[in-house]
Image: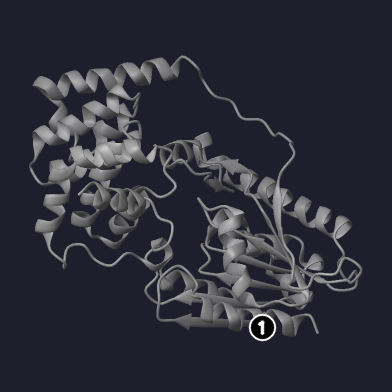
Amino acid sequence: MRARMAELADALHSGCSVRKDVQVRLLFRALFVCAFAASLGAQTLQRIPQTLVATSTARERADAFLKMGNSDSALVYLRLWTSANPRDTTALVTLSKLLAQRNQHEAALDALASAAAAGFGGSTAIALDSTLAPLCRNGRGRAIAERIEANAREQSQYPARFARQERIGRYRVLYPPQFDSLQRYHLVLLLHGNGNEPVMMLRWAKALGLKRAIVVCPEAPYVKVAETIAQGRLRLSAAGEDLAAPDTMNPTIVELSARWYMSVLDDAERSLPVVRASLPVVVGFSQGGFYAQVLVSRYPERFRAAVLLAPSYYSWGGIADRLDGVRRYGIEILHVHGRSDPIVPIQTGWLIADMYRRAEIPYTLLEFNGEHWIPDDLATRVGRWIEERFR
């Protein structure tokens, strides 16, 4: 049985900062959760989305199932996750809400009390939540709400302001097979998605099969502190969510993140053995796909083409207002999107397609029967498309 629980620790907490022996003990204490999971049956615990098969934590799986509308499976993984990570307040509040929806009010209050003890201060969010607010109107729930309000008051003693900053950033490099420093290579700028990091994308980039290109992947400029601590792995974003900046700052954040990525491109072109006469191709996954569009629309003279992999899209990126430059410089765009994508729905992909086609930009939409992540067989096709742009 202990060996089996160790396997569960591997499967459900890969990348977690909690030691393996502690994970096993916690999972023994959570055996009732496993029994509950078994009772749900195979139909409840749906297959894990393709993006989460290899390296996902229980928290990531819970989030994925919530986006798919499968709250039963999400509940199972949230219970496992919060048992091992009792200071993840976001997960605890979500768990409390799912339990309250099932009229398991005492269990919901237990989870909410744990969130309050861990420092959760979202009193306004609780008050506006139609599921959690009724729990906090009397008795034990009122005491928990008072603790959350106290946390909020303490946090309000330290008001935040926002300033532009400049610092050293890091990017990773994937050299082609049989790399020769005396030769010159084409350049690919690869942008990872929200909550990802470069190594994940560069592992995938090997499937592109690029023999005459160097791939560089910068870390997004903002660390997602809460997720990094909760999941025990570096989580990055170009949106600065943890800053809690007002929405009016979104265009500024986009602009500064675009400059951040361009500084990596500048450094790579200066320091790596690249063909000076060959413009780079930018490839972006998810949030990185949004920023690939931001870059080619702001700096169209710097790129040959763009590959958008399940890209997100936000109006404050100012992309639609800058498409004249994309068309004028003849930038070609390949867009790859899964028809069953639960993160960025294919409908978003169709809206993006319509925007580029109306602007008369050379554009190809490649739909596939899959979800958010791009499978390796499609990566090979993408790689061939990129190589054709380098000829």
Is 176 on the left or on the right of 369, as rendered? right
Q: Residue at x 54, y 24 (%)?
A: 160
Residue 219 on image: x %, y % = 64, 49
Is 186 on the left or on the right of 144, as rendered? right
Q: Residue at x 76, y 78 (%)?
A: 330
Q: Is residue 194 above or below residue 190?
A: above
Q: Circle 1 sits on which residue?
A: 385
Q: Nearer the viewer, residue 353 or 27?
A: 27
Residue kind at label 1, given as amino acid type: Trp
Say how many tags the image has: 1
Q: Is residue 354 visible?
A: no
Residue 203 on image: x %, y % = 59, 64
Q: Residue at x 20, y 41 (%)?
A: 28
Residue 183 on image: x %, y % = 89, 72
Q: Nearer the viewer, residue 4 or 78?
A: 4
Dividing the picture into quadrants, the one containing residue 331 is bottom right
Q: Is residue 13 above or below residue 133?
A: below
Q: Is residue 38 above or below residue 374?
A: above
The image's colour scheme reads one colour
Dividing the picture into quadrants, the one containing residue 266 is bottom right
